[in-house]
Amino acid sequence: MRRHLRDRGFFVSALLLVTLACSAPHFGGDRGHAAEMLVIREIQTIHHAQAQYMSQFGRYATTLKELGPPTSGDVGPQAADLIPYNLASGEENGYMFALTTTPQGYTINANPKVYPGSGRRTFFSDQSNVIHQNWSGEPANASSPDLK
């Protein structure tokens, strides 16, 4: 009787391990999707901050630090306190963010720090607020498909 219970316990444990192994990639994909949704939100945050910065200072910020909080002193064009410190540092949620000025306004790139470990897509946007995506390690650009 004991041996039968022990064998049955082993079978249940093995079945549980197989089930977990099969479902692990599914959960990982969900986690990756959630992280990418946060990155898209951060890009939208930067767009909103750029609109506020333009309203306050008559131009777009040239760096993420200009949108971030001051390290000392008062809020101003060098540090407008419109985005959190982590995002102003250029790294958030496993992605690297880069803000570049252009003659028309600005561009934002968000690329995984480690592709595909911290993200499966790259993102690009500009003052038009349209977000583009690329499903590879190659940085997205204005010609990349729109995020829908």
Image (cartoon, grey):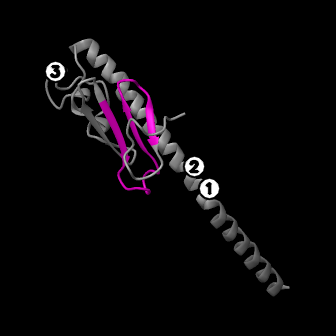
Q: Name the one closer to the observer, 18 or 135.
A: 135
Residue 113 among magenta residues: yes
Give the side of residue 73 with respect to residue 144, left or right: left
Q: Which label belongs to residue 76? A: none
On the image, the x and y values in percent for residue 123 come to: 41, 40
- The residue that label 2 is drawn on is 30
Q: Are marks 1 and 2 in contact (CB under 8 Å)?
A: yes
Find numbered disc 1 in the image and state the secondary structure of the residue it sits on. Answer: helix
Q: Which residue ends up furthest to the front in the rendered image?
A: 143
Q: Is residue 57 above or below residue 119?
A: above
Q: Real-space Cα distance between discs 1 and 2?
A: 6 Å
Q: Is residue 49 above or below residue 139?
A: above
- The residue that label 1 is drawn on is 26
In magenta, the rendered stretch is 107-133
Q: Which label belongs to residue 74? A: 3
Q: Quadrant of residue 106?
A: top left
Give the side of residue 126 with respect to residue 102, left or right: right
Find numbered disc 3 in the image and state the secondary structure of the residue it sits on. Answer: loop
Q: Are marks 3 and 1 in contact (CB under 8 Å)?
A: no
Q: Is residue 9 above or below residue 36?
A: below
Q: Real-space Cα distance between discs 3 and 1?
A: 47 Å
Amino acid type at circle 2 is Asp
Q: What residue lies at 86% left-to-right and 85% top-to-bottom?
A: 1
